[in-house]
Image: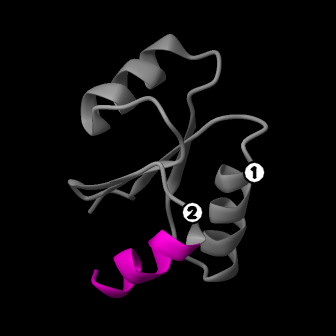
C-alpha cells in the first residue's frame, strides 16, 4: 500500500506542526512541498478543491487546510 501524501508549503506554521506531530507518532507519509512546484500545487488543488496547506491524502480520504487539532480525530478514525 502506498504512503499517505502530505502536501505542505514552506514557512507554513500549521504544516510544520503537522509534520512534527506525524514524525513524533512515527506515522509514515510522503511529504510533497507545493511551494514553487506548479505541478504539485495543481495536484493538491485538483485533489482538495482548494490551495491551502497542509492537505493530506490518506489513501483517497482528503483532509485539507487543517491543524493538529483536526488531524488527531481524523487519524483516530483510520
**Figure check: 51 above or below 1:** above
Q: Which residue is mark 1?
A: 13
**Figure check: 32 above or below 18:** above
Q: Residue at x 45, y 29 (%)?
A: 51
The image position of residue 49, as x and y in percent, is 28, 32
Q: Tag 1's secondary structure?
A: helix
Q: Residue at x 39, y 58 (%)?
A: 3
**Where, by quadrant of the figure, is residue 16 drawn?**
bottom right
Q: Residue at x 72, y 67 (%)?
A: 20
* Quarter of the image that includes the N terminus: bottom left
| Closest to the observer, 18 or 30 | 18
Q: Report the residue that reaches farthest toward the bottom.
A: 76
Q: Is residue 46 left or right of residue 14?
A: left
Q: Which residues are magenta?
A: 69-78
Is the residue marked by circle 2 packed among few (<14), some (14-19), or many (20+) residues within 10 Å? some
The image position of residue 70, as x and y in percent, is 46, 71
The image position of residue 29, as x and y in percent, is 49, 60
Is the residue marked by circle 1 packed among few (<14), some (14-19), or many (20+) residues within 10 Å? few
Tally the marks.
Answer: 2
**Where, by quadrant of the figure, is residue 34 drawn?**
top right
First in sequence, mark 2 or 1: give its number: 1
Q: Is residue 7 left or right of residue 64?
A: right
* Quarter of the image that includes the C terminus: bottom left
Q: Tag 2's secondary structure?
A: loop
Q: Which residue is mark 2?
A: 67
Q: Is residue 73 magenta?
A: yes
Q: Report the residue that reaches farthest toward the right.
A: 11
Whole-angstrom CA distance, mark 2 to mark 1, is: 9 Å
Amino acid at each position: 500500500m502506498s504512503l499517505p501524501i502530505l502536501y505542505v508549503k514552506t514557512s507554513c506554521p500549521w504544516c510544520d506542526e503537522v509534520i512534527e506531530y506525524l514524525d513524533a507518532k512515527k506515522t509514515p507519509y510522503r511529504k510533497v512541498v507545493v511551494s514553487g512546484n506548479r505541478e504539485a500545487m495543481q495536484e493538491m488543488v485538483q485533489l482538495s478543491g482548494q490551495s491551502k496547506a497542509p492537505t493530506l491524502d490518506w489513501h483517497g480520504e482528503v483532509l485539507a487546510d487543517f491543524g493538529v487539532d483536526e488531524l488527531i480525530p481524523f487519524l483516530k478514525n483510520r
